[in-house]
Amino acid sequence: MKLAIIGLGYVGLPLAVAFGKRNNVVFGIDLDESKIFSLRSGKSYIGDVSDADVKSLISKGFLNPTLDYSVIKEAEAVIVCVPTPLGKSREPDISYVLNAAKEIKKYLKPGHVVILESTVYPGATEEILLPLFESSGLKCGKDFYLAFSPERVDPGRKGFTLENTPKIVGGVNRESTEKAAGIYEKVCNHVIKVSSSRSAEMAKLLENTFRAVNIGLVNEIAQLCYEMGINVWEVIEAAATKPYGFMKFVPGPGIGGHCIPIDPLYLSWKAKAFRFTTRFIDLADDINQGMQKYVVSRIADCLNMQKKAINGSTILILGVSYKKDVADVRETPAYEVIKLLMKKGANVLYNDPFVNRFIVENKEFVSKKLDKNLLETSDCVVIITDHSVYDYEFIVKYSNIILDTRNATKVCKERKNVILL
């Protein structure tokens, strides 16, 4: 079949490749000219997609990157994978979805199946996209079909792929559910149909709210354990030996990525329309968003042990991506940590083997070479992202003092100069 996928980021590009590998013709639409140029040159900008796959699919005609929305006319199905960030006042911003939907409407034709994968609040597909598309004169369930299917992409994860991760599908009506499920069955081993697009939207938000709340809990426990002189990492490992009734979550410098810091707030925002207060979500968000300030306060403690202040000290940040072994810096806690350190007068340096350049408050930082001299001349080393490629024995050996927010140095035999979060 022929599909159009709008948005060629961390969700859209792997999806396009998965369909292309099954001999489906995919029109990949993105307004970022650099992405289109890169793909047409046979180069992938997503770690989970290889250059070889891009080159092969383009040469065979199964992947067709373009800036032109009119290719929708040639497609049988359209899948929307655009960003849904938060606005400046931390309210949902679905402008990218709306812009894509307006373009789809221009080329909507009988038989089209439109599927939204971008995370939205419960009811958005039915309340916003459905009336917009039906204003064209076409009737959903008869002339075209509309569904929501939440993306479940976890950058850098090797064990679970689009093919072997269960895929949830919910249409605005039964006909739409069946049509959308049939499309995903071409590439997914297990497609789960739910009763409505609202249920599918809510399932996505529940998945990530569950994670955000539990991370908030363990972040608070970490702070309490520090005050009580208890090693929180030892406590977590001990609790995790229970074979039932406990799920392991670990603390860190804050939450990052496009899902966990954002999705719960879509739900809490929508809840206000029902005069409902999502207390767990709000509390977890408050704790998680406060972790960067807490990390900076712990950096101050580390420097104080050396009779130094943050102002004027050289602080080396190891890892600025939001999770290990990826180049993704969306919502990374490293941004706020560096921002706060800069405000306090620190000389901030960073190293990240996956991120060559990093911009904070319009200041561009360039990743420094991680060597003995860099470690020895830094007053404090802060591990924000625990990349697997780091030689932690080397880092511990030559650093003056380390604040380890990920317990990455647990592999080291000696770590007398390491302070854990």
Image: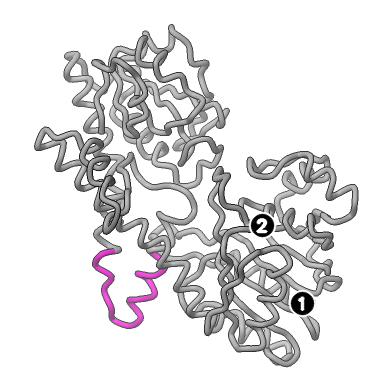
Q: What's under tag 1, amino acid-wise? A: Lys
> For the point 83% across and 43% down, which residue is it?
55
Q: What's under tag 2, amino acid-wise? A: Gly
| Position of residue 421 measured from the top left corner of the image (x, y, whole percent) | 25, 33
Q: Is residue 132 magenta?
A: no
Residue found farthest to the left: 228
Q: Which residues are magenta?
A: 265-280
> For the point 39% across and 60% down, which residue is it?
90
Q: Quadrant of residue 349?
A: top left
| Position of residue 86 measured from the top left corner of the image (x, y, whole percent) | 45, 59
| Position of residue 339 measured from the top left corner of the image (x, y, whole percent) | 37, 35
Left or right of 166 in this view: 19: right
Density class for disc 1 (Cα within 10 Å; few <14, some 14-19, many ≥20) is: some
| Earlier-in-chain disc, 1 versus 2 | 2
Density class for disc 2 (Cα within 10 Å; few <14, some 14-19, many ≥20) is: many
**Please, is residue 66 above or below residue 99 in the view?**
above
Residue 137 appears in the rendering: no
**Please, is residue 60 above or below residue 94 in the view?**
above
Q: Quadrant of residue 188?
A: bottom right
Colour mapping used in the image: one colour
Residue 106, numbered label: 1
Magenta highlight: main SS: helix
Q: Is residue 277 magenta?
A: yes
> For the point 26% across and 73% down, which residue is it?
277
| Position of residue 321 measured from the top left corner of the image (x, y, whole percent) | 48, 37
Please name whichever residue, 77 or 181, is drawn nearer the observer in this view of the structure.
181
Left or right of 156 in this view: 334: left
**Please, is residue 254 above or below residue 234 in the view?**
below
Would you name the residue on which mark 2 appears?
12
Q: Secondary structure at mark 1?
A: helix
